[in-house]
Amino acid sequence: MKPHVHFFGGQGIGWALDEDLTRAREAVAGMVHAGTFARSPIIHSAWWPPLVRAGRNALKGKSVVCFADNPPAFYLTCPGFEEAAARVDLWIARSREAVDQFRELGLPVAFAPYTVSQDTFRPIPTAERKGIRDRLGIREEDFVVGNFHRDSLERDISLPKAQKGPDIFVEIVERARKSIPSLKVLLAGPRRHWIRGELARRGIPFTFSGLMLDHDDFDVNVLPREELNRLYAAFDCVLISSRWEGGPYAVLESLFAARPVISTRVGMAADLLDGYLYSTPEEGAGLLTSIVATKPDFSPLRDAALVSHSTDALGSGLIEAYKGFCGDAEPVGRAIKAFFSLGLSRLHRNFCQPIGSHPGVAEVMENVRRKLPGSSRVVGAAVRIAEASGSPS
């Protein structure tokens, strides 16, 4: 019998969390009943904050499955995670790093990979690629690197977003230009303000595909994924410089689009980019120099990712996760209670009944707050994240 599942907690802006739910729905299409919150016994959330906001009564009697959109070490710096940890019945990790950290925290975890559409992110013929580069003002001899991350802070777009490491990116390309004088940066997407300013300040040539605005450009410079794929074709190498990640999607997008990609040792990148990971800006610059000299073949990595991070692989992982819970539709009485409890919690936070704290996770979070990195590996990772992001924890 097909389980009844409600996909919950998207942002409605078409960005990563919404993409997570879209891919999940597609992966299990025909194998589950995608129902309402009230009638579904299994709630599958894109991330944990909406669960905390829903409150205890709305979730009463339901089995809660939650994607880990970031590594648990990051969650340990976020107030409210101790509540989510007390209520989530199964975490769905997207990388080996996240699986290991959940296990270290003693939280129930399963693995289901990220995936992206192979119809959208795909190789583009050489002649079309040349036309794309020409329209961007990129010369044939230019060695083009970049990414499409939101790497300025939402609350202050003049500041860099620590997670995405734009400061690391700039240091890498500045070092690499000493041996690759033709290096040029290509940027696209919203909230790139800090990195654009810093590249200009250091005299590093770049092209921005979008409208160069001084104010928040989120409503202007979010690009359709089909256009992102065309822009990926302009790269000679995608450069990911994140300090922590659940994904990032850019790893799969680059590989599926048949573009070389290097990354810090984060999230899914550590699972897929063997031989093309770096730990320091010096190593990152060295990898770029090596790619210019050797023109390595990334097709074996692409072929492996097309299998390990396919829609079928995601669907199999999710269906296996749902098997641990009763999937029968909720009785009418309980469904009515869930409907009104969720509505009241959305109406005003005073109607949201606190879930309570997971004692073990609360203790670990206190160690992070006190900056006691020696207490465990995951605490050490969380302390480093807190220090990088300026978290008050």
Image (cartoon, rainbow, N blue to C red):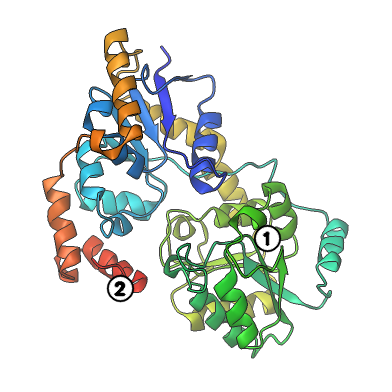
Q: Residue at x 65, y 74 (%)?
A: 291
Compared to residue 386, the image places residue 108 above or below, namely above
Compared to residue 222, the image places residue 66 above or below, namely above
Amino acid type, mark 2? Glu
* Residue 90 picture quarter: top left
Q: Residue furthest bottom?
A: 178
What secondary structure is marked by label 2?
helix
For the N terminus, which image quadrant? top left
What secondary structure is marked by label 1?
loop
Instruction: Tell me, yes or no, if residue 198 can be seen here.
Output: yes
Q: Would you name the residue on which mark 1 appears?
A: 259
* Residue 60 picture quarter: top left
Q: In the rendered structure, are the residues bearing label 1 and label 2 in contact, judged by CB atoms less than 8 Å apart?
A: no
Q: Residue at x 82, y 60 (%)?
A: 129
Amino acid type, mark 1? Arg
Q: Residues within 10 Å of mark 2 (few under 14, many from 20)?
A: some
Task: State the CA–CA distance, disc 1 to disc 2.
Answer: 33 Å
Residue situated in front as seen by the camera: 344 or 28: 344
* Residue 48 picture quarter: top left
Q: Residue at x 15, y 44 (%)?
A: 357
Q: Residues within 10 Å of mark 1 (few under 14, many from 20)?
A: many
Coordinates of residue 145 in the picture (x, y in percent): 66, 71
Coordinates of residue 89 in the picture (x, y in percent): 26, 34
For the C terminus, which image quadrant? bottom left
Coordinates of residue 339 in the picture (x, y in percent): 34, 20
Could you tell me how many numbered marks the image carries?
2
Instruction: Tell me, yes or no, if residue 299 can be seen here.
Output: no
Query: Which mark sits nearer the N-terminus, 1 or 2?
Result: 1
Q: Would you name the residue on which mark 2 appears?
A: 387
Residue situated in front as seen by the camera: 275 or 323: 323
Residue situated in front as seen by the camera: 360 or 322: 360
